[in-house]
Image (tube, rainbow, N blue to C red):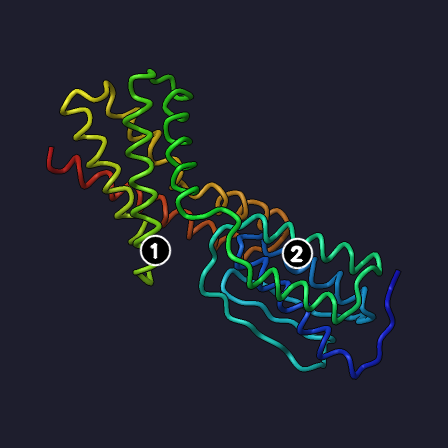
Amino acid sequence: MVLVIGSRDEARVEKVCMIAGKIMLMSGAETHRVEDTMNRMAHAFGVENAQSHATPTGINFSAGMTEVNNFVRISKRPTDLHKIAEVNSISRKIVAGELSLETAYDHLQKVEAEPSVYKVWLQILIAALVSGCFVIMFQGTWIDFLPAFIAGGLGFAVMTGMDRLLEIRYLAEFFGAFVIGVSAYLFIYYGFGLELDKVIIGAVMPLVPGLHITNAIRDMVAGHLLSGISKGVEATLTAFSIGAGISLIFAFI
């Protein structure tokens, strides 16, 4: 069902599409999904020739090829799959004709303003549990579960804290990996664990840019070469930062 509107409402349609795209891109969505969602929403509101272009750092959108172009800059891209799911749900309701333009805009503003579903302490706890479980998955022993649990939690907590203080996220990941390396080495040195490599590998897994790698591949497959390459480079730099933080420990032992 397509809702037909007049040209005077195109500005409001653009606002709805832009805020939807902004939420998705800032929450870690693939660029081709962002563009597809914006185009579908615009078409449902009667804009037949919507033009959208998303990159990892910005969104361009207009109601037509010769219409005014709208742009929003994206500086932070934390992962929040809950917000992506919320925007997808709103988009489906718009396409089905269940939401008006004003109601959709209000819902999207609420989604943008709401805090993360998972509190920071819960994220740290989950990262710690994941670290310990990865030790077992990599054929480690249960003796190394607790050292990896603590080291992974400490490293993730440091990365989260430094990310709020520093403009460069790669430095936050570097310091998080460094803390993991120091903690793991001290645990093994004082007999609280058996295999240093297993503890370190398990503890750094929550820092690994798995989502960036996946999105880079999906964007490349979808034909978004610029976004795919840039996300691939971002994932490579993140991996380099993690490796550098761990390597620094071995330079002094």
Amino acid at circle 2: Val
Q: Is residue 176 above or below residue 165?
A: above
> Is residue 222 or residue 6 the one in the foreground?
6
Q: Which of pointers 1 and 2 lies earlier in the amino acid sequence?
A: 2
Quadrant of the rendered image containing residue 157? top left
Quadrant of the rendered image containing residue 21? bottom right
- The residue where tag 1 is placed is 163
User: What is the distance, in whole Å, between disc 1 and disc 2 at their CAs?
Assistant: 26 Å
Which mark is on residue 79?
none
Q: Residue at x 27, y 27 (%)?
A: 147
Q: Quadrant of the C terminus?
A: top left
- As helix, strand or loop, the secondary structure at mark 1 comes to helix
- The residue where tag 2 is placed is 87
- As helix, strand or loop, the secondary structure at mark 2 comes to helix
Q: Residue at x 55, y 63 (%)?
A: 113
Q: Residue at x 61, y 52 (%)?
A: 84
Residue 155 screen position, x and y as percent = 30, 41
Residue 56 screen position, x and y as percent = 51, 60
129 relative to 83 in the view: left or right: left
